[in-house]
Image: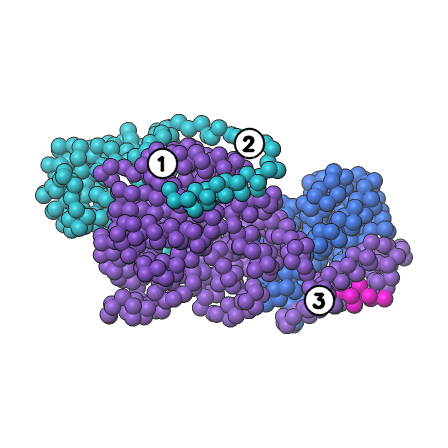
Amino acid sequence: MAQPLSAARQEILARIRAATTDVTSISIHHGRKLTARPGDPGLLAQRVADYRATVTRTDDVAGAIAALLAEHGARRVAAPPGLPADWLAAIPEAVRDEPPLAHAELAALDGVVTGCAHAIAETGTITLDGGPGQGRRALTLLPDLHVCVVRADQVLADVPDSIAALGDTTRPVTFVSGPSATSDIELERVEGVHGPRRLAVVLAA
Amino acid sequence: MRIALFVTCLNDTFAPSAGRATVEVLERLGHEVVFPEEQTCCGQMHANTGYADLAAPLARRFARVFGGFDAVVSPSASCVAMVRGQYPGLVGETVPNVYELSELLVDVLGVEDVGATFAHRVTYHPTCHGLRGLGLGDAPLRLLRNVREIELVELPEAETCCGFGGTFAVKNADTSAAMLTDKLRCVLDTGADVCTAGDSSCLLHIGGGLRRQRAGVRTLHLAEILASTG
Amino acid sequence: MSFPDAARVELDKAQQRRNLRKATTTIRAKRAAVVAEVPDWEPLRDEGARVKDEALHDLATHLERLEVAVTAAGGTVHWARDAAEANALVARLTRAAGSDEIIKVKSMATDEIGLNAALAAEGITAHETDLAELIVALAGDRPSHILVPAIHRNRAEIRDLFEAELGETGLSTDPAALTAAARRHLRERFLRVKVGVSGANFAVAETGTVCVVESEGNGRMCTTLPDTLITVMGIEKVIPRHADLATMLTLLPRSSTGERMNPYTSLWTGVTPGDGPRDFHLILLDNGRTATLADPVGRDALRCIRCSACLNSCPVYERAGGHAYGNTYPGPIGAILAPQLAELRDHTALPWASSLCGACYEVCPVKIDIPTILVHLRSRVVREQGAPPSERLAMEAMARVFASRRRYEAAQRGARLAGLAAHLPGPLRTWSGVREPPQAPRRTFRDWWRSR
C-alpha cells in the first residue's frame, strides 16, 4: 500500500479515538437472538402478489414451469447447475450455465428457472444465496423473465428469520421482492427497469 | 388541590384571556389557583434561538419561583415542553413539576367534563409541542367533546405544523407564510367559526392570518372554550 | 445563497410544489401503513439506534474489524480522509483496471464528494444508472430528494430530455415508456463497462459483508457484472454484526419507500470466485465524519441510514424543496448533517430551517432527535460564528427584562415589551405580508389578577 494511504488510515483512526474520548461505557447488546421460524405459505403468496409478481400454487412444479414459460413465450431459458431434473425437463430449450455463459449470451435468453435458499412470508421476498439450483447472481439478473420455485417448507416468517437462516454466510445473497421497479418519474410506479421485468413464483405444495 | 399558574410571558402580555380562563376552569372545579407574581419568561425563545447562555439564568429563575409547588399548570404546551425537555440540561435536577392544562385536567385530575357550554362550530389544531413534544394525545379533544352544544369538526391535515416555530417565522418568513397559507385553507375548509388550540403563540399566528383574510373565523385558546358557560 | 433566500425562490415553483406535495403525502401514507403492520416498531427503533451507537461509540474497533474481514474475503480496503483522497483513489483504481469509464449506483456518499466531476477532470466518464440520477445528470441538474432525486421534474420535461440526450424519437410521456428508454440506453453499458462504483447502506464489521438496498436492479448490475467493484462508504455505515441486518433491513425499506421490502437487496463479502467482480475495493471515507463524531450531541446524526422519512414528514422540506438546502443532504437530516460534515460557517442558516415541529424525530427509524440537535447547532452557530450584533443586543436586552419582575412589568406597562419585540428577530416582529400583527390588550393578565 502506498504511503499516503496508510497515513490516511492512521490519521482517521486517531481522529476517531480523539473524538470519542468522552465515551466511557459502550452498550454492547449482543444482537438479537434470531431463530429461523417457519412462515405461512398463504401469506407469502399474498405478499408476493402485492408486488405485482405472479404466484402459482401447485403440486406439479414441472407442469407449472412449462405452463409459465409457454405463457411468456420463453423457449431458450437458462438453467443453473443443480436444477432438479424434472424442472430442467420442463424447459423447451434449456441453456446450461456450465461453463459460464457470457453476460451478452445471458441477456439474450428468454428467461431463467431457479430454486431459492428460502422465502420470507411477511415481506413476500425470495432469498437467493447461490446454492444448488440457483446459480450465480448474473443468471437471475440479465434474462427478462425469472421463474422461481419455492417449496412450502422453505417459507420463513420474517426478515430476521431469513437473516438467521443465512447465518454468517460469505456467499453473495440477493433478496428479491417482486420485479424490479421505479417510482422516479412523478412517483408513478413502473415495474421492470433493469432486472427481470417479470417475476413468476411457483409455490410448491 | 393547590395549583400554581405559570401563565407565560406571551399570554400575560398578548393573550391574558387564556390565563383568566385557566383560572376560571380550575376554580370552578374546586381547586385553589395561586399566581406567583415573580414569574416572567421560561427562556424558550432564547434557548431555541441559540442563546442557551441567556436562557440558563431565566431557567434557574423559573425553578426558584415555581420550585415550591406540587403542581404548576400552564396554558401553553410549548412552554411546558421547554421546561420538561430543555430544563434538565439548563438547571439540572430541580425541574418544577409543570403540566399543560389539558394534561393536568385529564391525566392528573381525571376530569374530562369541565361543565362548559359553547354553542359554536369549532375545529381543533393540535400544536406540535402539545402533540409531539408532550404527547398529549387526545386529551384536549376529550375535553372538547364534553362541552355542551359544541359542534366539533375535524381539521384536515391537523398534525401538520402551522408554520409559527418562534424565531422560524421571522428567519424563514416566506416558508413560514407558505405553511400558514396551507393551514388557513384547512381551517376554512372545515366551515368552523372558531379555531382553537392549546398554544397562544400558534393562535396569534393563525389568527393573524385569518384576520388578514377577513375570514370571519375567530381563534380562541382551548381554556377559553372550557371556561365558557354559554 | 442562504436557506431563506433559496427557499424564497423555490417556493414560487408551482410544478415543484405540486410534485413534492404529492410525493411526500403519498410516501408518508405508505410508510404509516407498513409501519403499523410491525407490532414492535418502537422497540425496533430503539434497537436500530443501539446498533448504530454501538458501532459509532467504538468506531475504530469496528472499522479495523471490518478491514480484517474484507481483506480475508479477498477485498482491498482503502482509507480516505476527504473527498479529494477518495476521488483520487477511485480514479487510480479505475485506470488500474484498464478503464476510462465507470457505471455507478446511486449513492449519497459519491454525490457528497463530487465524484463524477472529479473523474471527468481525470478523463474518466461516470455513467449514472439510477433512473432519477440519470435524469438529473442529463439535465445538468441537482438531486432534490434522497430517495426520488428527480421528483421536481415532470414527465414532459423528462421526455424532452430523453429525446434530446438519448437520441430517442417519438417517445410518449408515459413513465413506463420513459423507463423503457432508460433501460435500452443503459443495458449496453451494463454489459460493456468493466468498473462499477457503489455506495453502501451497511457494512458488517464481523463478517466484512457489504449491503446495498435498491429498487431498479441497476445496483445489482453495477455490483455484479463489472470485473472491478469499488464501493465508497462513509465510515459511519459500519454495523457490528450480521444479525444486526435483521433490524436494519426491517427498519429501512418501511421507513424509506414505504414498502415491506424494496425489490432488491444485495449482500456480498469480498470476492466470490465464479460469481461477480474479480476485484473488490472498499474505500472508507471520513470527510467530516470524525469531526461530527467529536460533538457529543451532534454525533447522533451519524446514525442516519438515509431513508428520507424525515424529508417526507417535514413541512418545511415539502414546501421549500431539496435545492433550498444547498447541499447533498436535504431536509431535516441535511439541516443537521451539512453544518457538521462541512464547515459550520458555510451553513449557518440551516439549523434555523425548521419550525422544530418534531415530525422528523417521530418517524426516524434510528431515533435521531433532530429538533434537539438543531437547537444545539443554533447555539454552536451563535457561539462559534457569532450572531448579528443587533440580534445579540436585543436578546441580551430581553434577557435583562425577564431577569427582573420590576423591569418586566415596566416593559409591559409601557408596552415596551411589544416595542422591544418590534426590533427583535423574535417571534413578535416582522409579521410579514400574510398576517395581522398581534395586538397587546390594555390590561395584562397580572393586572386582572391583582384587580380580582
Q: Please name which of the two marks, 3 or 1, marks the residue nearer to the observer.
A: 1
* Colour cyan, chain: A
- Magenta range: C414-421
> Hey, what amino acid is under mark 1?
Thr
Residue at x 48%, y 70% (from the top left corner) = C13
Mark 2 packing: few (<14 Cα in 10 Å), some, or many (20+)?
few
Task: Please give the chain letter of the residue carrying mark 1.
Answer: C
Q: CA distance from mark 1 to mark 2?
A: 27 Å
In reply to whether residue B143 is colored magenta, the answer given is: no
Amino acid type at circle 2 is Ser
Residue C382 location in percent, x, y?
A: 67, 57
Q: Which chain is blue?
A: B
Q: Residue C427, position in %: x, y? A: 70, 62
Residue that badge 2 annotates: A27
For residue C71, the mark is 1
Q: Which mark is residue C429?
A: 3
Which amino acid type corresponds to the residue marked 3 in the rendered image? Answer: Arg
* Residue B169 coordinates in the image, percent (x, y): 64, 63
